[in-house]
Amino acid sequence: MASAAADGFFTKIVTWLQSTNVPTQIKDVDFAGLFTNPWFMVPFVALVGYLIWKQSFNELIIVVIFIGLWWVSGTEYMQTLVVDGHVQIKKILPVLAGASAILGFIIYLFFGRS
């Protein structure tokens, strides 16, 4: 009973997310245009400068990881993880290993060092 309710809940979230076209907008981002746009670069450089000034290297590393994951998600390798509606297990295992390593590193950043 609880599983059916959870499935319905997640189905509603996925349907709402698809209706907003956010996944399509993220996929269609023009990286070259984004990083030459002053409306993006000025706040981004200000954020990086502020993080360096405050010596918040944990947060700066998180920003770099986020940009790296954004870049990796657009590579040809990631586009071929699902072929004809089937997940390619041999290709997804390195992605899962990398994701778990990044998650472990982030946990270490916040909880491992005092």
Image: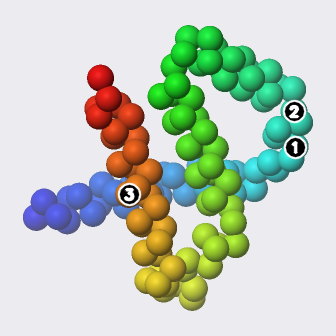
Q: Looking at numbered disc 2 in the image, what kind of residue is underneath it? A: Asn
Q: Looking at numbered disc 3 in the image, what kind of residue is underneath it? A: Ser
Residue 9, x across and y down, in percent: 30, 55
Residue 27 appears in which quarter of the rendering? bottom right
Q: What residue is at 38 percent from the left and 34 percent from the top?
A: 109
| Above or below, 52 relative to 94 | above
Residue 33 is tagged as 1
Question: For the residue carrying disc 3, how many other residues have a C-alpha within 10 Å: few (<14), some (14-19), or many (20+)?
Answer: few
In front: label 1 or label 3: 3
Q: What residue is at 69 percent from the left and 66 percent from the top?
A: 75
For the residue pair 109 and 39, the one nearer the viewer reads as 109
Does 100 sit left or right of 74 as displayed?
Answer: left
Residue 61, x across and y down, in percent: 54, 34
Q: Mark 2 = which residue?
A: 37
Q: What residue is at 38 percent from the left and 57 percent from the top?
A: 100
Disc 1/disc 3 C-alpha distance (Å): 31 Å
Q: Is residue 21 visible?
A: no
Circles 1 and 3: CB atoms closer than 8 Å? no
Seen as rendered, the residue at the extreme top is 54
Where does the N terminus fall, quadrant-wise?
bottom left
Circles 1 and 2: CB atoms closer than 8 Å? yes
Q: Mark 3 = which residue?
A: 100
What colouring style does the render use?
A: rainbow
Circles 2 and 3: CB atoms closer than 8 Å? no
Under tag 3, what secondary structure? helix
Q: Looking at numbered disc 1 in the image, what kind of residue is underneath it? A: Gly
Residue 15, x across and y down, in percent: 47, 58
